[in-house]
Amino acid sequence: MVRHPLYAAWVWCIVPGLALMQGTLLALLAPVVAALFYKLCIPHEEAWLHDLHGEAYKAYSRRVGGIVPRFGRTQEDG
């Protein structure tokens, strides 16, 4: 579904849930802050994985979303 399931869980489930439990409007910005933080972390991991797996990882990353699932057909599906 996604290449970074732990980051996706934090951005889409855990941080928003904690923000809602906090009960303040300011806390609702927490998922945005988490998403921005992960946008800074993910490129380093992606580069490492590309170095490790080469073209296979590049093809995989075209098919599978980072923290947001990609639905539907891709060019590789035909």
Image (cartoon, helix red, strand yellow):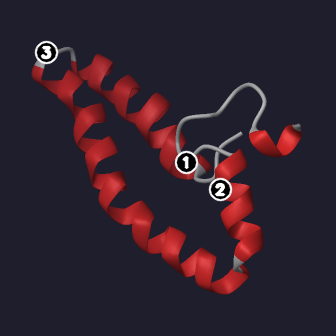
Q: Amino acid at mark 3?
A: Leu
- Circle 2 SS class: helix
In this image, 58 relative to 40: left or right?
Answer: right
In the structure shown, which secondary structural element does the residue marked by tag 3 occupy? loop
Q: Quadrant of the C terminus?
A: top right
- Mark nearer the N terminus (2 vs 3): 3
Pointer 1 and pointer 3: residues touching (CB < 8 Å)? no
Q: CA distance from mark 2 to mark 3?
A: 35 Å
Q: Residue at x 49, y 71 (%)?
A: 45
Discs 1/2, front: 2
- Judging by the rendered image, the residue that carries numbered circle 3 is 25
Amino acid type indicated by mark 2: Ser
Residue 52 is labelled as none
Q: Quadrant of residue 50?
A: bottom right
Q: How far separated are the C-alphas under marks 1 and 2? A: 8 Å
Q: Residues within 10 Å of mark 1 (few under 14, many from 20)?
A: some
> Which residue does the numbered mark 2 point to in the structure image?
61
Question: Residue at the spot x=77%, y=41% of the render?
Answer: 75
Task: Please report whichever mark, 1 or 2, sits nearer to the chain's N-terminal start.
Answer: 2
If you read the primary sequence from the N terminus, does the residue marked by circle 1 or circle 3 appear first?
3
Query: From the viewer's perspective, is the residue at label 2 or at label 3 nearer?
Result: 2
Q: Nearer the viewer, mark 1 or mark 3?
A: 1
